[in-house]
Image: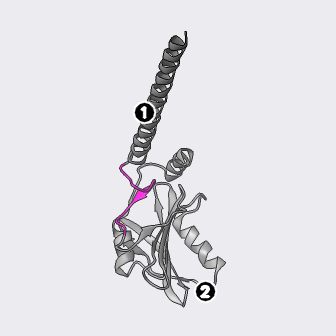
Amino acid sequence: MKKVLGALLVVIMLFSFSACGDSKDEEKSGTDEKKVEKEAKDSKDGLKYGFYETEIPKGYKEKDENSYKDTYWIDESQSPKRKIQILASSFNKTAEEEAASSLDYDDRKTAGEDVEFAGYTWKVVNFKWDDDLPSATYYADINGRCVEVNMFCLTAEEDAGKTFMENLKFVDGDLKEKMHELNKIK
C-alpha cells in the first residue's frame, strides 16, 4: 500500500511540474504574441513615433515620459540640455492661430519668418531659454491638426534642428483620430 501511494504521489508531482512548465511556455508565448501585436500596431502606418517619424539627430535620446500626444528628444551631453518636443494640438486652432496665441501669451516671444521643411510651411515664434539661448517653436497645419515643434536651446537653423525638421513625415488622415487610437493602445 505504501508503494502504491508513493508511486501515485510521484505521478501527481510529475504532472504538477509539467503543468507548470506548460503554463510558463504559454505565458511566454502570450507575451511574445502581445509584443508582436504591439509592434504591428506601432508600425501599422509605417511611422515610428505614433503620428510622425523623423531622423533623430545624433546624440539625442527619447525622454522616458513620452505620451501618445507628444515626445521629447534630449541631448544631455551639452549644457544646458538641448530639447526637441513635438506634439499635435488637441484644439481646433490653425497654425497661425496657435502662433498668434503664443505671442499674445508671452511678450518676450517674437514672430519669425515662415520657413519650409518637409513640404510644409511652418510659422515661427522665437524665444530665449536657459541662459538666454536662442530657441523657437514651429507651427504647421498638417492633416487637420496644428503640429507644434518646440526647440529649447537650439533652432531649426542648427544642424540638429534642421535634421529633425527636414525629415518629418506624418500619418495620413486626421491626426486627432490617430492620437485617440494611440491613447487607447497605451
Question: Residue 89 in magenta?
Answer: no
Disc 2 to disc 1, how far (Cα)? 60 Å
Q: In this view, does 152 lie to the left or right of 164?
A: right
Q: Which residue is drawn at 44% across and 48% down?
A: 173
Q: Which residue lies furthest to the bottom in this view?
A: 131
Determine whether 143 is above or below 161 in the image.
above
The residue closer to the viewer here, 34 or 28, is 28
Q: Which amino acid does label 1 sit on?
A: Asp
Q: Is residue 186 left or right of residue 22?
A: right
- The residue tagged 2 is 108
**Label 1 neighbourhood size at 10 Å, few (<14), some (14-19), many (20+)?**
few
| Horizontal and vertical percent position of residue 27 | 47, 35
Q: Which amino acid does label 2 sit on?
A: Arg
The residue closer to the viewer here, 77 or 19, is 19
- The residue tagged 1 is 25
Q: Give the range drawn in magenta.
A: 46-56
Q: Quadrant of the N terminus?
A: top right
Q: Which residue lies furthest to the top in this view?
A: 1
Q: Which residue lies furthest to the right in this view?
A: 105
Disc nearest the viewer among 2 and 1: 1
Residue 77 numbered tag: none
In which quarter of the view is residue 37 placed?
top left
- Per the image, label 2 sits on a secondary structure element best described as loop
Of the numbered discs 2 and 1, the one sitting upstream in the chain is 1
